[in-house]
Amino acid sequence: MNRHLKTLELDKILNMLASEASFEESKELALSLRPQNNLQQVLANLKETEDAYILSGRFGAPSFGSIKNISGCLARAAAGGMLSMSELLRVAEVLRIVRGVRQWREKCASVQSVLDNRFQALIPNKYLEDEITGAIISDDEMSDKASPALSEIRRKIKNASQKARDVLNKIVHSATYKKYLQDAIVTMRDGRYVVPVKAECRGSISGLVHDTSASGSTIFVEPMGVVEANNDIKVLQSKEEAEIEKILFELSASVGSFARQISDNYEYLTQLDLIFAKASLAYKMKASIPLMNDDGIIELKKARHPLIDKNKVVPVDVRLGSDFSTLVITGPNTGGKTVTLKTIGLLTLMAMCGMMIPASDNSRISVFDNVLADIGDEQSIEQSLSTFSAHMTNISSILKIANNKSLALIDELGAGTDPVEGAALATAILERLSLLGTITAATTHYAELKAYALNTAGVENACCEFDVATLRPTYKLSIGVPGRSNAFAISQKLGIDEDIISRSKKLVSREDRKFESVVRNLEKKRQALEEQLKEAQEKTLSAKKSLEEAEEKVQRVKQQNEAEIQRAKEEAARIVAKTRAAALDVMDSVEKVQKEQKLSAEDKARLRQEIRNIENTADPVEKVKPGDYKLPRKLKVGDSVLLFDIDKKATVLEINPDGKTVLVQAGIIKTRASISNLRLIDAPKPQKPKSHGGTRTVTKQTDIKAVTEVDLRGMTATEAIMDLESAIDSAVLSGINQITIIHGKGTGVLRREVQSFLKTCKAVKTFRLGVFGEGESGVTIATLK
């Protein structure tokens, strides 16, 4: 990593990124990240980070475990070598992580991502994974189920061991031999079962001596009765080792056959782990994706230096490269000038590395071929360089590299030497960088550089504010205004005598005093404008909030209004249905009379018309005639009244001066109504005469008979239409949506009359002639609404 990147502390950010990665390979990849100067590549890297950020936010990050590099194991397996049990388990762990990451992506497949090509490149191998984990229990233990042969061998070893232990248990519990034993236990030496015998009783138990205790008081004897069983165990253990080796070779061969695939899986896991580590770090930094360009434009909004405590860092707004290419930052020491420079440089490098930056949305950053920095005291004792010499050495190297695709950040330009010469040198350096087209930000205390920025196109002043009252910096960067050193004000606050301050002011040149006065006035005006802007923004926000509340209230009233209308419609429909049922009951009675007294068709039609009149007057939505009602007294505000035409209660809110209309509120609705349409609630209601459209009430209740078929054969056209209309009304009230009309074939006159009526009937949706099995042209099938 070059000196400029370290100066801007990119190495510390990469260390933070590495700590978010899951395993060593991805940690190394994070530490090896370097800024990219290709805009398309940077955009692609940022898009990957953004997608990982979105996926992590919605579904949580996938688990990458803590797998280790297996490239060496895979190469040895591919060459025919045998892997150990621990190495095979590491391979199985990689396969498990691959399978888990693929399953995680499948669960969140509803969100498309540019990372899908990497996810799809992960190829799980459940068979090989299960083969390894089914055979190997731990780093040094093979499962009995690894092979049938191994299971059989271990069964025989267990039986032989039990046989040997049975013989030895008899010895250690025998009253005869117990007195010769040091302890009544069975132990092992060199993989063979033995018993501890007192040294002085060596000849009392015949067998092979395998070991002696450190004190020499105990010898470990293998009795002759268990020698054969121990020999069998030894042979079987050799067979077990051979079988385990055979299994390991077979598993290693399987791994070798998939070595390339597993290696690719591991590489893709490493890349994905790094990308999701970027997303994880972005969440911790509360970062966002910047808008990238290659035009040298930088515009940071509420940018925060990521290495400063988030509870202490002060966000700054910086722009550079659009209206001007050089920014001269002035202000007192410890005012935040250096932090601003580092923030510009570090956030630019982070974005070029494909990382999200701790700044507000819509911040803009450019890619550069070189990000060059001379920040801090780089005095070298070893090279016998002063602070000034060290800075000039760095700036010299910057001037050799800088071009129109470079970003230069210089702290305390021209400091450390004679002020006059230093200011002149600093001005010349800025001019050279401007001629090269380099985007430059520099900090200084020189008044000459402030004047240079004021008088030169493409160069702008900025200042880090300082609160003289509290002697504390605000860390706020203001662009377009040169900063003041505030040396006199600070010294006076700290107790320097007034006469010394006065003498100091006199020693300052007239031009410098005039310049400082202009700067002071500009600062006052800027602060006043900022206060006005803040107040205007607050008022705008308040007005916007009030507007939203008003719109919400209007919407709520609108919804309540619609609900009220819907309830009124439902009530009207209920009354109509009730009235229609009563009318049908009357019609049924009339039909009985017709059969008994031979009522003419004309009389029946007249009765049918009367029923329609009943329905019309029973509909509460229809306006009724007011009749000759007169108010018993003049209305006043607060009176409860009845809106006569819609039969709705209301309250009088306002009486118009003309005395003809009033403003009333019915429920949540306010409306103007004619006084002639109002009835006082507390006054007796007048009876509305029938001749003026009053409502006729039928008190008799009857059950409505459901009709699905009506036979009109043998009737005249008038009779048929009346019966058909009655049948349709009964079907509608009963909820039947289809009715069969039997009119016969005959001459076709009745069929035409029926179909002519159906065309004009509002209750009929469609109709058709019958088909085979339904009566064909002798019937008409009508579908009701």
Image (tube, helix red, strand yellow):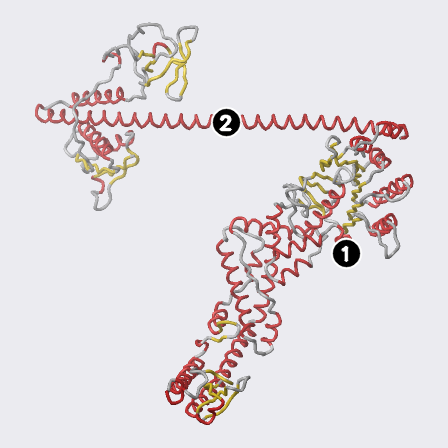
Residue 502: image location, x then y, percent: 86, 27
Residue 106: image location, x then y, percent: 49, 56
Residue 132: image location, x then y, percent: 50, 72
Q: Is residue 101 left or right of residue 433?
A: left
Disc ID at residue 464? none
Q: For residue 599, which quarter of the picture?
A: top left
Q: For residue 769, which quarter of the picture?
A: top left
State which quarter of the image contains the N terminus. bottom right
Q: Which residue is mark 2?
A: 551
The residue positioned 50% from the left and 82% from the top of the image is 241
Q: Is residue 132 left or right of residue 700?
A: right
* Other-residue count near label 1 (Cα within 10 Å), few / some / many at <14 / 14–19 / ≥20: few
The amino acid marked with disc number 2 is Glu
In this view, 151 is above or below 304: below
Q: So how many labels did they put on this image?
A: 2
Q: Earlier in the sequence, mark 1 or mark 2?
A: 1
Q: Is residue 481 left or right of residue 217?
A: right
Residue 543: image location, x then y, percent: 57, 25
Q: Which residue is mark 1?
A: 2
Q: Nearer the viewer, residue 734 or 81?
A: 81
For the residue labelled by badge 1, is the local secondary structure a helix, a strand or a loop?
loop
The amino acid marked with disc number 1 is Asn
Tell me how far mark 1 sits from mark 2, CA to CA. 59 Å
Look at the numbered discs 1 and 2 and tell me whether their residues touch, using CB distance below 8 Å.
no
For the residue labelled by badge 2, is the local secondary structure a helix, a strand or a loop?
helix
Q: Nearer the viewer, residue 664 or 508?
A: 508
The residue positioned 57% from the left and 64% from the top of the image is 67
Q: Nearer the viewer, mark 1 or mark 2?
A: 1
